[in-house]
Amino acid sequence: MTLFAGASGADYSLDVTHPGLRRLARGWLWLGLLALIGSGLLSVVLVLSRAPQFQNLMPVGDFFRVALVVHVDLSVLVWFVSLGGILWTLSGSTRVLGLNGAALAVAGLGTLLMTVSPFVGRGGPVMANYIPVLDDPVFLWGLATFAAGAVLLVARSLIALPAWVAPRDGADALRSGLALGLLPAVIALIAFAWSWFTTPADLSGKAYYEILFWGGGHALQFIWTLFMLAAWLWLASACGGRVPMSPRVALLCFALATVCALAIPVAYLLWPAHTVEHRNLLTFAMGLGGGLPILPVALAALLAVRPGRPIADDARPLRAALYSSLALFCFGGLIGFTIAGSNVKIPAHYHGAIVGVTLALMGLVYHLLPRLGYGLPARKWATFSSYCYAVGQAMHIGGLMWSGGYGVQRKVAGAEQALKSTSEIAAMGIMGLGGLVAIVGGIVFVLVVIGAMRRSPPATD
């Protein structure tokens, strides 16, 4: 077994032709797109509430935190699960398609309830890590309903996805790798249930939700990382490159990205969910699983789509998304080594990682649009959207990292930030400007996707 697959390389892409699978994938795409639209509208409030130039004009306090809760859940939880719905649907068989449709409908209902909850409920924001919540029946029922949809999606995927086999080509490696992503998905569901049953009854508020979502939230990160690795290889192939990594090594990288999730149930068996030892083991496992497979896959993707290599015009948006994803994920990872204490370096770190995953999946959406029966995305605007989003997010997290060096606290806005020096104000100003640039990139992405959805697919011979 060798790292490189020879001069010809391997093709990592999936067949997208079955009408039933395409129809369901389109539904999951719509759910993810609508979640991004709602999240983008809320992100305007968040950025302006933290930017020194505008913070005094914006309502802050609970209003800022309510917007932050729904923004995070839509842009991370709903968006990533929706893209998981696309990937698991397209990589599976046609068995139990009705269960997939039921999962989409239930998840959509839960998303709707979470989105409207700030306008119909009165619950306060709880800024728990991984899954922040509004302590309000409408939001909590929405979250539970969405979780039920995710359970149905995982259950259907366990039935429909192929059992692990030695991969003969890149497509086999992708299918088996995405099937491996169901391991941390099942572990996440078990962890959420385990925490729910074992969390001390006298806890409430942030302490309760922090423990409730800590174990399962860590498991979710393994899934998102796997999606990004699969998207990198798929995008590299879609750009016309033959990826210099053998399918067996690619599958090994997918396994490394998921197997460390097995430490999560071990942590639950050894220590209660609220202990320091439990939390430390989960943090170590996530760092190990999220670090080991990144470098070889990133290197293979870059070698397949190296700068200066000729590329078709229609593939330029895909290359832009791939380059941007690689850069932002690495930037976020490097920031993680500088974290000391609780300040805005922490959101700078995970924004880089999460944005890296998001950019990879945005590029994959561009690639899949014509294959799902839509038109081609507008090439120049699609390319611009990835670079604009990446530059804006780089400024955003760079400003947060700079501010974190001065001890600016996370999850606060307006006067609560207590910005004193010119350097602190300048850093948060760069953060705010970068956030606005990223919002422009996100808006362009949504408009490009909607435009492609309104056009006819390209003619085929």
Image: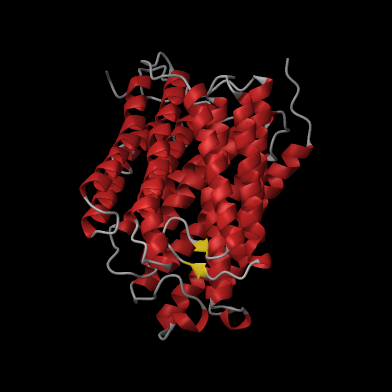
In the rendered image, residue 26, in percent from the top left (x then y), is placed at: 67, 34
Relative horizontal placement of residue 318, taking residue 273 as reference (left or right): right
Q: Position of residue 91 (x, y in %)?
A: 52, 24
Nearest the eye: 375 or 138? 138
Q: Quadrant of residue 83?
A: top right
Q: Quadrant of residue 397?
A: bottom left
- 250 versus 423 height, above or below: above
Q: Residue at x 41, y 79 (%)?
A: 423
Decide: is 158 above or below 323: above
Q: Residue furthest front?
A: 201
* Residue 104 picture location, percent across and down: 63, 38
Residue 82 appears left or right of 30: left
**Image check: 29 left or right of 134?**
right
User: What residue sits 32% from the left and 24% below the top?
Assistant: 249
Of 447 and 270, the residue lying toward us: 270
Residue 70: image quadrant is: bottom right
**Residue 76 at least partly seen:** yes
The percent position of residue 97, horizontal first and vertical second, equals 62, 25
